[in-house]
Amino acid sequence: MVAVLAAGGVVTGVWWKPWQSVDLPDSACWGSLSTADYKALAGSSGKVGVAQDGEIDGPVAYAAFMGDCRLYEVGRAPGYDIVDVQVDSAETDAGQAYLAPFGDGTAKAVSFGADADGWITPSGSAVDAYLRCDYQAAIATKETANPFVRVLVSGTLGLSASSAAQVRQARVDIAWKMAKAVAHRLPCSNAVRFADAPPTVPTA
């Protein structure tokens, strides 16, 4: 069924996919992530639920919101997300300022390729990737089309036994993989050049 969401003052229709609880699902986030992508972020129980709405397959209605996919540890209180992937349009690629509310210091730049820049918070709690993307929006006009697509990957720290470096790298890997999926599936009419492999996280 169709749900109507308001984001940034703009109302858009999205397809809602109901909640489902599964043990480390084989695929998640619009089928773009595998268990290997987020296993390092999961808690000791290995029980992961998925909540997803919106789409990354175009054309999409113009809005500040396109889609959100949350993987959470089953049995914990709400808000403890193993990983949260948000995809939306953006007027600029000013990720450093966008990550400021996460409040753990100055974000560091990471490159996902010639046409995809990014930022990561020092703790690794959030990674923000931007790609220049010309895509077909259902109601796009010259005044409403935004030049960038943002892929924000965040989540709660301390849920898994993985090291801080492993957690940071896992989030960067997910951002790189999801950005590539978005560029292909939205799709971007311009050729978005990505690195052949995810960037190595910067040292603190």
Image: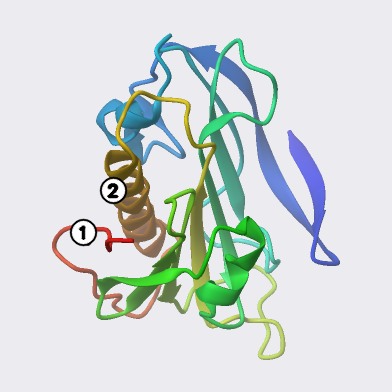
Q: Position of residue 93 (x, y in %)?
A: 51, 79
Q: Is residue 134 above or below residue 186?
A: below
Q: Residue at x 34, y 48 (%)?
A: 168
Q: Label 2: which residue?
A: 169
The residue lying furthest to the bottom in this view is 142
* Image quadrant where one finds the N terminus: top right
* Image quadrant where one finds the C terminus: bottom left
Q: Position of residue 154 (x, y in %)?
A: 51, 47
Q: Residue at x 31, y 79 (%)?
A: 115
- For residue 57, say whether it is visible: no
Left or right placement of residue 135 versus residue 65 in this view? left
- Asked if the residues shown at circle 2 and circle 1 are in contact, with their CB atoms under 8 angstroms apart, the answer is yes
User: Total label count?
Assistant: 2
Name the quadrant containing residue 38: top left
> Circle 1 — which element?
loop
The residue closer to the viewer here, 47 or 163, is 163
Q: Amino acid at mark 2?
A: Gln
Name the quadrant containing residue 199: bottom left
Q: Amino acid at mark 1?
A: Thr
Spatial CA span between label 2 and label 1: 7 Å
- Local packing at callout 1 (Cα closer than 10 Å; few below 14, some 14-19, many 20+) is few
Q: Label 1: which residue?
A: 200
State which tag comes first along the sequence, 2 or 1.
2
The residue lying furthest to the left in this view is 196
Q: Is residue 43 above or below residue 58?
A: above
Q: Residue at x 75, y 40 (%)?
A: 2
Looking at the rendered structure, which numbered label has been put on residue 97?
A: none
Q: Is residue 3 above or below residue 193?
A: above
- For residue 181, say whether it is visible: yes
